[in-house]
Amino acid sequence: MSDIVTIGSATMDVFVECDDANIVSVRKKDHSTDFMSYPYGAKLEIADFDTQVGGGGVNTAVNFANLGFSTSVIFKVGYDIYSKGLFTFFEDKNINLSSIIQDKKDSTGFSIILTSFEGDRTVLAHRGANAHIKKSEIDFEAIKNAKLLYIAPLNGDSNKVLDDIVKYAKENNTYVCFNAGTTGIKKGFGYLSKILSLADIVVMNKEEASMATGIYLRPDTKDVKYSQEIVHPDLKEMFNKLKISDYQVIVITDGKHGAYAFDGKKYYYCKPFDGPVTSTLGAGDAFASTFCAAMSRFGRDISKSLVAGSINSSAVVSKFGATQGLLTFEEIVKTMEQHPEYQSVVI
């Protein structure tokens, strides 16, 4: 029996850094988009190269175990060189691997991660077995015996198992943290609302929340300065649409701008914890899973949990790799004590 079961993707990640990468911003009246670009038709030198294990299921399981929780992981891989690398990676991680699914007919997930000089990245992902998890392959007994089920973003047809998994967890009093992914969100709010209504904690980034709700943050005008508000009025509208059940806590992250939360009565904002940025890969997984873990350790104190998540996320982005900089709970608490001025704002 494990305290926490995570379900999500597992991939072999190849990091590529090229000094010739350009960042191009395209702006419209109501929004802007940044693109990473390379000279068309050119052969470019790679400045740095690394291979690591990643994916939401992997990253969050490693974090939960590092935070001191007994942890099991559910993900699907093939029988190939990449799955061998995944199992080798887990040899010293103290994580229960008995619920992992292997399929000889499928390939292990694989990603090429293009990193920029700003530390951000663009991911080229081959989902592989991650997109083909079936209900019959899920270890429901592990979910039943866990205190917490953490659902990382799932891909493709794997989203079809979400309804059954979340419903089963709630029927067996297993606490559910749901980190919604783009594939599920694209199915529409009607589909997503069934899962949202049963999840105890829901985490999305701002772009995902906007996609899920159909609400977009209006930019400042010469008459109205929305940016001067701690919580943008349109962000409040997103929260109110996403929060379906009274017991839920909704969290929306906004990258370098910080993270927000809503419990139905109050809004919370936590700015990012200062630190160097080497790569942002894994920052979202570290923040979301640390927040869920901290809610348990800190008696559902949302303010402290946002701070804990931000500190651990900052540690991850300071290193090259999604799990390289993860802190223990003791290290997080020590950092909180050393920086008493770093607090969430409650509105």
Image (cartoon, helix red, strand yellow):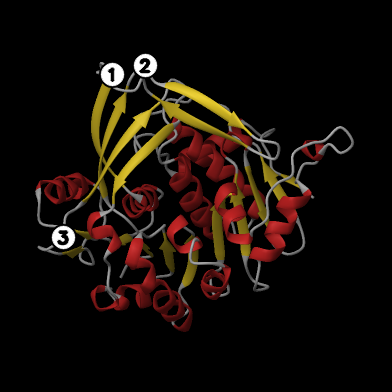
Q: Would you place residue 340 above or below residue 179 in this image?
A: above
Distance from disc 3 to disc 1, alpha carbons, whole Å, reads 34 Å
Q: Amino acid at mark 1?
A: Ala
Q: Is residue 315 left or right of residue 143?
A: right
Residue 326, given in percent of the width and then of the height, sits at 40, 39
State the SS at label 2: loop
User: Could you say which is closer to the camera, residue 240 or residue 293?
Assistant: 240
How far across and down, in percent of the image, does residue 112 sit? 28, 37
| Residue receiving disc 1 | 42
Residue at the (9%, 63%) spot, across then down: 104
Q: Residue at x 32, y 55 (%)?
A: 9
Of mark 2 and mark 3, the one earlier in the sequence is 2
Residue at mark 3: 106
Q: Does the CB distance between marks 1 and 2 fall below 8 Å?
A: yes
Nearer the observer: mark 2 or 3; the answer is 2
Kindly identify which residue carries mark 2: 20
Q: Give the residue type at disc 2.
A: Asp
Q: Could you tell whether 169 is left or right of 194 in the image?
A: left
